[in-house]
Amino acid sequence: MMEEVKEVTPCLSVHGHNIKVTEVLKDRDTLTFLIVSQKLSGTGEYHVDRTYDDFEWLQQQLFFQEDMPGIEGVIFPPLPAKPQVNASAKVIKQLGFLGLGEWQPYCKALEAFLRQVTAHSILSKNKAVEIFLTSSDPPGRQRARKNIFNRLSQAVEEMRKEGHKDVDEFFQTERDHNLVLTGCTKTAAERFLDVVLTEQKIAVASGYFSAALHLCVEPGENPDTQAFSKACVKLSEVFDSMKKNMARVAENNVSTLGLGLDLESRYQEAEKEMLFRRTCKLVELETAKRNAEKAKPVKKAAIALFHSVRVEMLQQALVQWCEKQLCTAKESADQFGQHLQAFRGMAW
């Protein structure tokens, strides 16, 4: 017997694997990202503009799918931290490679986020993903405000439950590995960022020195002066080449390993969140079991009392029913007896 072949309908109307964030527009402190995706129909492209608020809206829509089977075990693709125009040193440290002031790496990070979402077998089914990529109207400009008290309570809850041992050896081992890898990846990203920042400083210093050497060039017929000027010009060209080379090396570092370490670090945090959700469910389950065990002795007596009271009440109702019926039957018998005596008197 041949099984029925069902055609699988794509969840999205775009090719998710080649979504591009092509440009970023800056209006004071607001950044707008231009997103281009090819239509599955092959008839053209979708061009939409989205702010970071829109990306946060999409992420919230993905998080809050409580009715979606398997959503609790999903490692959500991590959204980069919010970009900052003219970021401070503290913000740059938080953003890492994405806070260096060059927006192309940040666009690549957003691209990676969208491609990971559209490639996910569960998340890509959310209608919000289609709306985000194709709708001309910005979906998230009126997003819900974040509640700082919820974040604080979550932090306290995490501290309370992070040491809870998992009943499954596989997940406990994964938690241990994740803890180590999260720290190592973050440290590696920070150290590599220091390397890139140093390369950028060398490039800037080389540029300054190259420009300063031109100040030593003097006109004149003196052979020594001419020779010195030629040496300064040539040395300036050398330092200018050093500047360009070092800037290119720093750019390559950011666009390759830098972005890779940044994404890996954020994914380790995303896995940590998923494992924490599992831990919370375990704690809830174990607490419920303990409460059920504690309630057994008390509930046994309470249930026994409940049944005895219910039986007594039903028994009283039955007795009262019988008594009432007997009383009514007796009254009816007396009444019918009187009627019978009356009929007999009339016959005489």
Image (cartoon, rainbow, N blue to C red):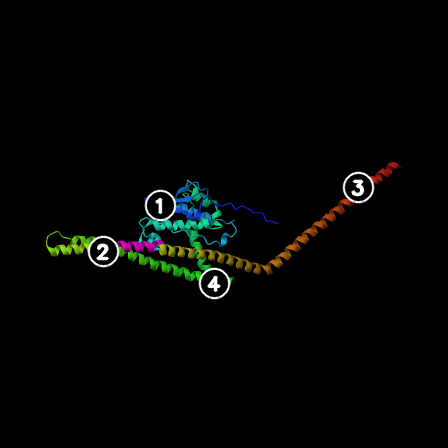
Considering the numbered disc 2 on the image, is that residue within a helix, a strand or a loop? helix
Q: Which tag is nearer the camera, tag 2 or tag 1?
A: 2
Residue 300 visible to an observer of this rendering: yes
Lower position in the chain sequence, tag 4 or tag 2: 4
Residue type highlighted by circle 1: Glu
Label 2 neighbour load within 10 Å: few <14, some 14-19, many 20+: some
Which region is colored magenta?
A: 235-255
The numbered mark at residue 173 is 4
The percent coordinates of residue 35 (x first, y second) are: 39, 45
Label 4 neighbour load within 10 Å: few <14, some 14-19, many 20+: few
The percent coordinates of residue 220 (x first, y second) are: 11, 52
Q: CA distance from mark 1 to mark 4?
A: 42 Å
Q: Which tag is nearer the camera, tag 4 or tag 2?
A: 2
Label 3 neighbour load within 10 Å: few <14, some 14-19, many 20+: few
Residue that badge 2 annotates:
238
Lower position in the chain sequence, tag 2 or tag 1: 1
Q: Is residue 184 above or below residue 129?
A: below
Residue type highlighted by circle 3: Gln
Lower position in the chain sequence, tag 3 or tag 4: 4
